Amino acid sequence: MPPLSFEVAGGECLAVEGASGSGKTRLLRAIADLDPVEGLVFLDGAERAEVPAPQWRRMVRYVAAEPGWWSDTPRAAFAPGLVDGGRLDRQLDHVGLTRAHLDMDIAVLSTGERSRLAFVRALQGEPKVLLLDEPTAALDPGSAALIEEQIKFQLYGGRIVLLATHDAGLSQRLSHTRLVLPKPRAVAGAGAS
């Protein structure tokens, strides 16, 4: 990936665009401190390396295109104090889910339900930055519209959003600026037969 330099203010959305393999996911994961990368990432004047990883990840939340779950039900991924509050009920309702989804077996939930639950999971604890990797790709149009409205709500609340997407319409509707990554170069001998 070539060197990049960009700045995003609170309440703004940066759309990260590019062909498959251009590094959109890698960029988001690097900002979230999930993958090693050269370079500097700052938030509120603090450089990522100066902040303990758990603290950084509370402030900067990454939502993968295919979110991972490490328990049988989603409930375990939510802090106990947050599960008991009405705020979580409202967040679930805003994306077309209910509290009952928290106790369903992950294997029984649809891809779209898991995706929407991961979005709600990322909102817990009021992060300053949301890194969203294809947040509507696995959703039907109605569910995608709900997530889009919630992203707008997060922007109105002053959060920074980086949005990696192939959906040009979503990018146009939400982003204040765009970062277009160059097409990946072919590796000599790759795919040759």
Image (cartoon, rainbow, N blue to C red):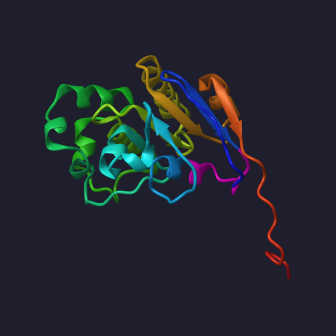
x, y percentage for residue 88? Answer: 25, 31
Secondary structure mostly taken by the magenta-highlighted segment of the chain:
loop
Quarter of the N terminus within the rendering: bottom right
Image quadrant holding the C terminus, namely bottom right
- Judging depth in this view, the residue of 140 and 164 nearest the camera is 164
| Nearer the observer, 124 or 93 | 124
Residues drawn in magenta: 18-27
Query: Residue sitting at 39 percent across and 57 percent down?
Result: 68
Determine if the magenta segment contains residue 26. Answer: yes
On screen, 35 above or below 187?
Answer: above
Q: Position of residue 67 (x, y in %)?
A: 43, 52
Q: Nearer the viewer, residue 141 or 60?
A: 60
- Residue found at x 19% / y 43%: 79
Q: Which residue sits at x=57%, y=56%?
A: 38
Among the 4 quarters of the image, the one containing residue 126: top left
- Can see residue 108? yes
Would residue 181 appear left or right of 100 to someone viewing this image? Answer: right
Magenta span contains residue 22: yes
Residue 108 position (above or below residue 121):
below
